[in-house]
Structure formats: structure tokens, C-alpha cells
Amino acid sequence: MSLALRLARQQPAYRDPRARAKDFDEIDSGFTFEQARVEAERCVQCSKPACAIEGCPLGNAIPRWIDHVVQGRLRQAAWVLATTAPMPELCGKLCPHERLCESRCVLGQASKPVAIGALEAFVGRVAEERGWFAPAPSRMPSGLPVRFAGAADRTDQSDPTDRSDRRGHPERIRGASGHVAIIGSGPAGLAAADRLLALGHAVTMFERAPVAGGVPSYGIPSFKYAKSRVERLVERVRRKGAAIFCGIEVGRDVTVRELRKDFDAVLLAIGAPRGRLLDLPGCGLEGIYSATGFLVNGNVPAECIDEADRREIRRGRRCVVIGGGDTSADCVRTAVRLGFEEVRCLYRRSLEEITGRLADRGYAQEEGVVYQFLTSPTRFEGSGRVERVVCERMALGEPDGSGRARPVPIPGSEYVLEADAVVLSLGYDVDRKLLESARCQLGPDGLVVDDNLMTSRRGVFAAGDVVRGADLIVHAARDGRDAAMAIDRFLREG
Ligand SMILES: Cc1cc2nc3c(=O)[nH]c(=O)nc-3n(C[C@H](O)[C@H](O)[C@H](O)COP(=O)(O)OP(=O)(O)OC[C@H]3O[C@@H](n4cnc5c(N)ncnc54)[C@H](O)[C@@H]3O)c2cc1C
């Protein structure tokens, strides 16, 4: 038997579910050096690695950097990864690897696939801790108008939307081919900034939230990925030379049209932030939260939340979360940590159709969450505050537009669940109002872009969830990288 087949797949040590359910700390510290080496030895080094070619949206050279891990050359491993992956520590921890790279690992045909995700997270973490990804504190962001110079760390209170002295400023494109405005600082915006800076362009980012980082900074709970690590990721891009202005909402404080006049190109990386609502009786009762409202206010310190978005989460004994994706797994696990004793997740289809990372659902179950499949709410009841969710059971019918079996109500199957809080986690849509005001063509999921990720407005590009609809970090990072390359071509070719 080959060495790869003899070695067992390594598992990072996870904290005891009872202990971890009491705090918001990450639930594992990843592979040890020895575990990483052993796991890396399981890779059979395929000459045409399907894990990388078909399985990884970023095209990471997986066997190559894994070989460096086997040889103990972690710095080289990190370097190879960083050539294609703008945020390996984040993707290593949060990608649904079982559906991506690991699903294409040949070892999976005879044994368990190589734990590529945990290895990537290991290399990313070591590189992050040792500062291999972070350049020395930068010179002033290249090409930044003087009035913005001190504001890159948000200490300058000058108004970054005041464009009076920008055009033709001598600093404007010194040492850079062009100056690009990026709207939104999530994975797509950060990945684009990273690549644009490497290509020699100046980058200014505008972020609506008080802190940069997108969904990983305010939506994804810190037990999945620590906020301090998102801060380090943002800091890395800042140190490379990006000016990042938080608390600036494009559409309110400055328009896309105005930015297009002042910058050589604009990238829309504003995600898909609109939580879907349910139109059911009782939806307006107190104690019914949107997923983002619940996650943000449950996980993020109040000072990092826009005042308009601050809500008090009233505690109680029973919490019902409706919906079955990544977000709902985060909501149920947040509810456990907020002290709800009985946490249920209702999903209208079956286990086979559920989306979201398998691992997170497993962790939720270990932490005491109960999943109720083929169940849908019909109304919410209570006097002023929600007290009950009336549910009905579902059967599966013919596939619908999404290709998944359509849930069909079973007549007379209604029953009642007591609830002190309800969280609606039904998916996200793009902010059509902002996009309409930007006069870019919209499709059913998001912005319409051409092969170069350019919108219907020349010089205005788009990347990430704003194009795809709610999706994955790795796809947003890929889009951001691709958009940066397209913007580079656009700026060079004119
Ligand atoms: C709760 C939750 C959990 C998730 N878990 C996972 C997971 O485990 N694994 C995974 O791969 N994916 C996960 N996802 C999906 C993933 O987070 C997204 O696909 C990814 O963040 C999209 O990146 P983005 O840069 O396109 O958008 P975002 O991350 O949404 O970033 C967009 C940024 O633009 C800013 N913005 C919006 N409008 C404006 C404006 N008008 N002006 C200025 N700034 C603006 C927003 O504040 C935000 O910071 C999760 C999503 C959610 C909501």
C-alpha cells in the first residue's frame, strides 16, 4: 500500500462543544506543524491535479505548495499560494472544500481526500503570524491626492468625497499607471486592490461600514474566523498602499458618476446585502430579526456598528432560525452563544438539498442545535412580541428553477413551536436601488457585466456578490483578481 493510503487524514483539535458554545473564540487552532507535514505527505502529487485545475476557483497550484510543506519549506509554500490566492488564511478556513478542491482529490476515490483546506489554513496562519504576507509599512499610497495622504488610516478627518483638488493633482498618478476607486472592502474589493497595487496602480477604497472587511468583518461570526484576523488582512492591503475610507456610502455621500469622473476606473464590489424577507402574518412582531441584524448585533461590538443598524437582541430560552445556508448555520451557533437553550433550524427542503458548509452544520449539531427538515413557517403569533411559530410539514415535488426539488405543503400538517426569538435567514439580494441610480444594467441576480467584468457603463467594473448574487468568498476573491486584471488592460489600452 502506498504511503498516502497508509497515512490517516489528520484532524485539527477542536475545542469541546460545551466549552466553545459559551464564547465567541475560534473553535480550533488548526494543524500543528507535525500534523501539517503528515497530511501533506498524503498528497500523491498528480501531474494533472484536478484539485487545482477543476476544484479551485483561484487555480491555486495545490500540489506544488503542498510539496513545500512536506519539505518543511513553509515560506516557499506561502509564496506559491500568494501568487494566486489573495487571502489563503480566509479561504483555507471558510471555503466549502468538500465541494471544491477536496471533491477532486484522487485520493478521495480510495480513501479520504487530502485535507487541502486545513493545510491552506495552516500555511496561511503561519504566514500571517510571521508577517510573510505583510510588506513593510508603505510609503504614502501611490498616486493618492495629498488631501487623502494621512487619511489612509482614517485619522484624517478631511472629507474624502470633496473632489475639488483631485483632478490633475501632481501626486495623482506618480509611479502608478492609473488611480482606481473601489467601492466596498469585502473579499472582492480587497482581492482587486491587492492585485491592482501589485500591477502598479493607485487604489482608493470607499466602505460604508465603520470598519473594512465586508461580510467577514461584520457578518461571519468570530468563532468561525476571528475579527482580529480580518483586521490583519485589511491592514495588509492598506500597507501595500491602498487608502481605505470607512463610513462613506457611495450613493449617499458620493455618486458612482462623480467617482467615475475623478478616477480612471471604478470597481463596484458592494456585495449582496439585502436580506430576503418573509411575507407572512406576524412578521412585524418584536423579536423577529433579519439574519444580518442578528449576527451583527450578536457578534460585533456596538462601536463597530453603524448607529442606524444597532439593535438590542432580546434574550430568551428558545430561538428559531428559518433557512438552511451558511448564514443560518452562523445564526444558530450565535444564538447558542447568546444563551438561548433551545435552538432550532427550520429548513423547507431535505438534507440533500441544503446548501452551506457541511462542517458548520456538524459543529452546530455538536453544540446542541436541532435541525428540522421539510418544515416551513406559515405565521408568527404573539402579543407584541413573537411567542410562537406556526409551521407546516412539506413534501418534495418536481425540481424548480434552482434545479432542486420544490417543497410542497402537506395539508393539515400544521403544528406550533414556542419561540422567544426568530431569525430569518432566507438569502440575500443585491441593493438594486443603488445600482439603478448608478445607471448600470441589472440582471435577475445582480449587475450585468461583459467578459471583462465591465458593466454597461464604460470604465465601471464589478466583482463578487454584486454580480453573482450571494455566493462564496473564493468566488468573490477570484472575481476581484480578474476585475483587477481587466482594469489593468483597460487602463493600459485606453
Ligand atoms: C453570515 C454569512 C456567512 C457566510 N459564510 C461563508 C463561508 O463560511 N464561506 C464562504 O465562502 N462564504 C460565506 N459567506 C458568503 C461570503 O461572505 C460572500 O460571498 C463574500 O463576502 C462576498 O464578497 P464581496 O466582496 O462580493 O461582498 P461583501 O463581503 O458583502 O462586501 C461588500 C462591502 O461593500 C460595502 N458596501 C455596500 N454598499 C456600499 C456602498 N453603497 N458604499 C460603500 N460601501 C458599500 C459593504 O459594507 C461591504 O463591506 C457568508 C455570507 C454571510 C452573509
Image (spheres, rainbow, N blue to C red):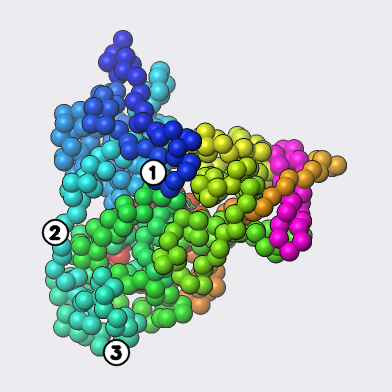
- Identity of the residue drawn at 40% across and 34% down: 15
User: Magenta stretch mostly in which secondary structure?
Assistant: strand
Disc 2 residue type (three-letter): Ala
Is the CB atom of the residue marked by disc 1 within 8 angstroms of ligand 1's nearest atom? no
| Residue 26 - label | 1
* Image location (x, y in percent) of residue 79: 19, 44
Image quadrant in which the C terminus is located = bottom left
- Identity of the residue drawn at 16% across and 31% down: 72
Residue 481 visible to the viewer: no
Residue, disc 3: 164
- Residue 24, placed above or below residue 142: above
- Mark 3 is surrounded, within 10 Å at the Cα level, by few (under 14), some (14 to 19) or many (20 or more) other residues, namely few
| Residue 136 - label | 2
Q: Provide the residue span drawn in magenta.
A: 374-399
Can you tell which of label 3 and label 2 is closer to the viewer?
2
**Quadrant of residue 113 in the image?**
top left
Q: CA distance from mark 3 to mark 1?
A: 46 Å
Residue 425 is one of the magenta-drawn residues? no
Q: Quadrant of ligand 1?
A: bottom left
Disc 1 residue type (three-letter): Glu
**Quadrant of residue 208 in the image?**
bottom left
Name the element at disc 2: loop
Image quadrant in which the N terminus is located = top left
Can you tell which of label 3 and label 1 is closer to the viewer?
1
- Mark 1 is surrounded, within 10 Å at the Cα level, by few (under 14), some (14 to 19) or many (20 or more) other residues, namely some
Residue 296 visible to the viewer: yes
Name the element at disc 3: loop
